[in-house]
Image: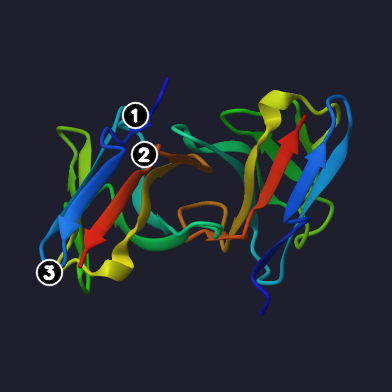
Amino acid sequence: NAGVTQTPKFQVLKTGQSMTLQCAQDMNHEYMSWYRQDPGMGLRLIHYSVGAGITDQGEVPNGYNVSRSTTEDFPLRLLSAAPSQTSVYFCASSYGASTYNEQFFGPGTRLTVL
Amino acid sequence: DQQVKQNSPSLSVQEGRISILNCDYTNSMFDYFLWYKKYPAEGPTFLISISSIKDKNEDGRFTVFLNKSAKHLSLHIVPSQPGDSAVYFCAAYGTYKYIFGTGTRLKVLA
């Protein structure tokens, strides 16, 4: 199993550009989520999904869109990038959605918005 | 409003001694509490968890203690090893959401 994969590893954008961060898992996990990590702020939940076709907002959803058309994929879209979105982004997945299960994290995408 | 707090940004401990990492939370509805370990340029990896109905959970050198009345949990690492040097995040789970603290950087000195 590849686990949780994220692409790209690094990305530089200009203010106003759009892009999609890709996340995929091959463990048939129901639950998937996106976090951003900023210095002194820890990991903050952006959006999460409890199954295909179901998504919801986390702590810091503004400026980000998600969709979950398949169990495997959970892309994160930035429609109009801003410097405040410079961060390291992590995708995670876990087996069940109805209760706690261990989350598996991807290696992260480092995004810089100029 | 930070629901999960780690008030110590860093901690240095001598190899072989005990490391104690602390975490406080504000929401009494959390069902589970977790600790993750993170090395630079990698994603966090799960370390240990505890249900809100328990007060202690052990896994090898790692023990997590939960004090519900104080809304406080701690991670004990005994004995500490240089490979334990990493950033440790505590997290809480409730109603489909995992809320993380800001992290504590542990340095174990050889």
Residue B25: where, in percent of width, then height?
30, 32
The amino acid on which the numbered mark 1 sits, given as a three-letter code, is Asn
Residue A111: where, in percent of width, then height?
71, 42
In three-dimensional space, the C-alpha distance between marks 1 and 3, rounded to whole angstroms, equals 35 Å
Looking at the image, tell me whether mark 1 or mark 3 is earlier in sequence order. Answer: 3
Q: Quick check: A81 left or right of A58?
A: right
Residue B27's disc number: 1
Q: Residue at x 26, y 37 (%)?
A: B8
Query: Most extreme residue toward the right, as rendered?
Result: A17
Q: Secondary structure at mark 3?
A: loop
Label 2 marks a residue whose chain is: B
In three-dimensional space, the C-alpha distance between marks 3 and 2, rounded to whole angstroms, equals 33 Å
Label 1 marks a residue whose chain is: B
Q: Are marks 1 and 3 on the same chain?
A: yes
Looking at the image, tell me whether mark 3 or mark 2 is earlier in sequence order. Answer: 3
Label 3 marks a residue whose chain is: B
Q: Quick check: B48 left or right of A36?
A: left
The amino acid on which the numbered mark 2 sits, given as a three-letter code, is Phe
Q: Which residue is mark 2?
A: B30
Disc 3 crowd rating (10 Å Cα; few below 14, some 14-19, many 20+) is: some
Q: Quadrant of residue A36?
A: top right
Above or below residue B2? Residue A75 is: below
Q: Residue at x 43, y 40 (%)?
A: B100
Residue A108: where, in percent of width, then height?
64, 54
Residue B16's disc number: 3
Residue A32 or A112: which is nearer the viewer? Answer: A112
Q: Quick check: A31 left or right of B85?
A: right
The nearer-to-camera label among 1 and 3 is 3
Q: Residue at x 56, y 57 (%)?
A: B41
In three-dimensional space, the C-alpha distance between marks 1 and 2, rounded to whole angstroms, equals 6 Å
Query: Most extreme residue toward the left, as rendered?
Result: B17
Residue A57's disc number: none
